[in-house]
């Protein structure tokens, strides 16, 4: 496993108990994606893979509609899967696949879904291509776009040079997905801006930690934090820019 992936795994393991307290954007995003998925849903999937399932928002929603479907929940953070195991203790049709989503073996699933996890991949194009190839009927995903947290990066860039997280532009994702789309598939997408407000920068940093999203590009070094807090004690709003995409096999 790469150092980067080990760090991601450690952050999400640590956040497994606090994630549900703060993940309102991720939960709403799961709801949006599932609603779009069900809008034209005329088949019942035999099996669903949720890649980077976290605490299981996607299976929670889909189980209401497809109680008999087999669900395969993947995550790199074992502690996240433990939360799912406790949540779904009474649901026999759920299976757990710990590990890197990009090393899943050659099984093919009726429906592959991934909410708010692909942005953690070091090669997003490869990840989308890979998960698309593992779906026979539907591949539905959400991920973050260029411009996410720009407001935050503008604040901290006055105190330290930051590694701006490398999210794609919507046009790049649309072009990739149009290329990947098979002849028997349709592709639809949606864009969403989701602002969140905090009382002060430290509130935002605590939020990132509880979420497991304390990637180096978002955090401020301790020595700079004091300076920042002296001058930047005011409230701030950060904006998530979210891309939702669904590939769907169309009946002839
Ligand atoms: C922001 S959370 C989203 C969780 C969930 N899908 C949701 O809707 O709330 C991202 C999740 O992706 C997982 N993850 C990140 N990289 C991964 C990888 N390469 N393979 C599998 N899981 C990964 C993390 O451990 C974390 O649980």
Image: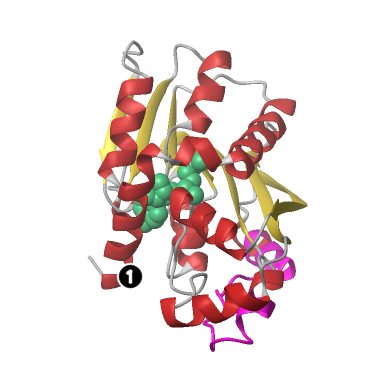
* Residue at the extreme front of the image, as rendered: 230
The residue closer to the viewer here, 212 or 189, is 212
Where residue 3 sits: x, y (%)? Answer: 26, 71
| Residue at 31% in and 64% down | 7
What is the quadrant of the N terminus in the image?
Answer: bottom left
Q: Which residue is mark 1?
A: 4
Q: Which SS class for mark 1?
A: helix
Q: Is residue 160 visible?
A: yes
**Where is 180 relative to 27, above or below?**
below
| Residue at 42% in and 76% down | 222
Where residue 50 sits: x, y (%)? Answer: 44, 38
Q: Residues within 10 Å of mark 1 (few under 14, many from 20)?
A: few
Q: Is residue 146 visible?
A: no
Q: Quadrant of residue 34?
A: top right
| Residue at 48% in and 12% down | 67
| Residue at 50% in and 66% down | 124
What is the quadrant of the C terminus in the image?
Answer: top right
The residue closer to the viewer here, 106 or 120, is 120
Which contiguous range is marked in magenta?
A: 153-177
Where residue 5 sits: x, y (%)? Answer: 31, 64
**Where is 41 relative to 127, above or below?**
above
Q: Quadrant of residue 154?
A: bottom right
Where residue 41 sits: x, y (%)? Answer: 67, 25
- Magenta stretch containing residue 127, yes or no? no
* Residue at the extreme left of the image, as rendered: 1
Left or right of 203? Residue 37 is: right
* Mark 1 beta carbon near ligand 1 (under 8 Å): no
Left or right of 101? Residue 175 is: right
Colouring used for the render: secondary structure
The residue closer to the viewer here, 80 or 53, is 80
The residue closer to the viewer here, 103 or 2, is 2
């Amino acid at each position: 496993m790469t150092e980067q992936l080990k760090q991601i795994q450690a952050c999400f393991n640590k956040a497994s108990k606090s994630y549900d307290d703060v993940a309102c954007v991720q939960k709403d995003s799961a709801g949006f994606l599932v609603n779009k998925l069900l809008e034209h849903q005329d088949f019942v999937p035999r099996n669903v893979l949720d890649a980077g399932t976290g605490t299981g928002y996607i299976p929670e929603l889909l189980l209401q509609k497809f109680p008999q479907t087999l669900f395969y929940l993947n995550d790199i953070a074992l502690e996240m899967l433990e939360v799912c195991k406790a949540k779904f203790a009474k649901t026999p049709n759920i299976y757990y696949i710990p590990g890197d989503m990009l090393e899943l073996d050659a099984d093919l699933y009726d429906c592959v879904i991934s909410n708010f996890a692909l942005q953690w991949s070091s090669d997003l194009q490869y990840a989308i291509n890979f998960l698309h190839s593992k779906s026979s009927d539907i591949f539905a995903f959400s991920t973050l776009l260029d411009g996410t947290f720009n407001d935050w990066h503008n604040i901290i860039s006055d105190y330290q040079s930051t590694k701006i997280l490398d999210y794609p532009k919507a046009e790049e994702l649309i072009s990739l997905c149009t290329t990947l789309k098979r002849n028997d598939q349709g592709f639809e997408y949606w864009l969403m801006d989701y602002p969140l407000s905090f009382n002060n920068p430290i509130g935002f940093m605590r939020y990132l930690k509880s979420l497991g999203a304390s990637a180096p590009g978002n955090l401020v070094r301790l020595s700079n934090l004091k300076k920042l807090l002296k001058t930047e004690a005011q409230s701030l709003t950060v904006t998530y820019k979210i891309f939702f995409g669904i590939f769907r096999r169309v009946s002839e």
